[in-house]
Image: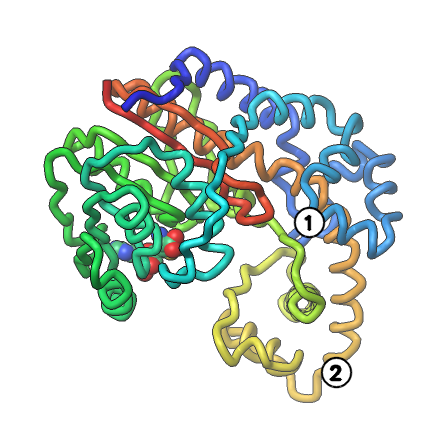
Amino acid sequence: MTIPNMSATLLIEHCARLDALLDSHRHLWRSSAFREPDPAWVDALPRLAAAALDLSEEALQRLEVDPEALLNWLDPQVLNLRTTLAAAEPPWVGADLPEDNPFASLHVPGRKWAQIRHFMAALPPATTPAVDWCGGKGHLGRSVAQLHGRRVRCLERDPGLCQSGRALAAALPVTFECCDVLLDLPRLEPGESLLALHACGALHEHLLDRALGEGVARIDLAPCCYHLTPTWQAKARGAADPGFDADDLHLAVQDLVTAPARVRRARLRERAFRAGFDLLQRHLRGCDSYLPQPSLKGPQRQLDFQGFCTLMAQHHGLELPAGTALSPWLEQGWIRDARSRRLDLVRGGFRRVVELRIVFDRALFLAEVGYAVNLRRFCPRTLTPRNLLLQAVRD
Ligand SMILES: C[S@@+](CC[C@H](N)C(=O)[O-])C[C@H]1O[C@@H](n2cnc3c(N)ncnc32)[C@H](O)[C@@H]1O
């Protein structure tokens, strides 16, 4: 089971180039205009700031959802960004996908099925048993069992998903183990490969630890949600630790994809609420600094601005004085958010740089402990922005 090999030397070079870019532009990607309305770089790069602030809403929306257009727009004002990224971006191995579409019988939603087809096209025609790590309903595991004839064990914490998965997999050599991969340390059988499609943060970190501990022969991992891990540290020894903090990890996954108008309107409304509350809380506290705002859950998304401010104020133990007129704060929130969306385009240009740096670290780490490693884009970004596939085979 060989794979095209990215040598440790090549991975170290990639890490060093990305580090140099991140170091020299730290002032651009570390500051968020959403939290600090006047990032320091605005004075240092007045032409770039003016170009951002002049963008029409239509042009802004296009740049927000199209990373290629954004890089072109930032070039050449943000030196070396486009060229460094182009050199580091893993190859897209356009796979010959079968035209027939068995997904109707596999009961997989269309977009997920498209991701799975691309993921599977990057796998060798192996018949070894596999584990679908944090497999949800086991769509990937079931596809591998059906199309490649492999025996698959799906590890999944949610009993409802396991139950649905078992029903869907009835006639296939697929089993489900309802377990918490972080706490239960499910056993790994000799000879099993590990497959993981979008195992979030700590889940894929743990996969790597287990794989190493148990000498797993092959890993095929599409990581996601890098920020969903208590802390992140470089594992590779051959490259410097980029020292990413929680905000940096979050930046790596803050992609916007083209969304229906209704979804876009709801997102912008929430952003304006957040910006409005931020202005209000600074005023109430007499302190010009940002306070983190928790994400909204379920019915909280339907709150009006009054309800939103009450919720956030309670969260921070602040009192909203009776009779506070809120509509001027909301008006200012819309204005400030229009400004910060434009300025934060610049920060957004570094999203993929941070993501690649995170994943190159893990690739280098695997190379250092004796795996032959490959990194590729397994599907177009339109199917999922988390389209990196890390493949490792023990020599
Ligand atoms: C983003 S989903 C990916 C599911 C599946 N791989 C796919 O691509 O459709 C992550 C899955 O991890 C499961 N999960 C979360 N924490 C877990 C844990 N500690 N142990 C096992 N599974 C977990 C979730 O229930 C969810 O099904």
Front disc: 1 or 2: 1
From the top left corner, tell me how far across and down residue 123 is, in percent. Answer: 36, 34
Above/below status of 370 relative to 30? above
**Residue underneath mark 1:** 65
> Which residue is found at the position 51% from the left and 36% from the top?
355
Local secondary structure at mark 1? helix
Going from the N terminus, do you reach mark 1 or mark 2 first? 1
Q: Residue furthest front?
A: 100
Q: Which mark is residue 325?
A: 2
In this image, 179 relative to 21: left or right? left
C-alpha gap between disc 1 and disc 2: 35 Å
From the top left corner, tell me how far across and down residue 231 is, in percent. Answer: 37, 43
Local secondary structure at mark 2? loop
Above/below status of 346 relative to 285? above
Q: Residue furthest bottom?
A: 323
Q: Is residue 206 visible?
A: no
From the top left corner, tell me how far across and down residue 251 is, in percent. Answer: 56, 45
Q: Quadrant of the C terminus?
A: top left
Camera-side residue of 143 and 3: 143
The quadrant in which residue 162 appears is bottom left
Above/below status of 207 relative to 366? below
> Which residue is found at the position 36% from the left and 38% from the top?
221
From the top left corner, tell me how far across and down residue 58 is, in percent. Answer: 83, 55
Find ligand 1 in the image and state its quadrant.
Answer: bottom left
The quadrant in which residue 44 appears is top right
**Amino acid at pointer 1:** Val
In this image, 333 relative to 297: left or right? right
Camera-side residue of 251 and 32: 251
**Amino acid at pointer 2:** Ala
Q: Is residue 61 visible?
A: yes
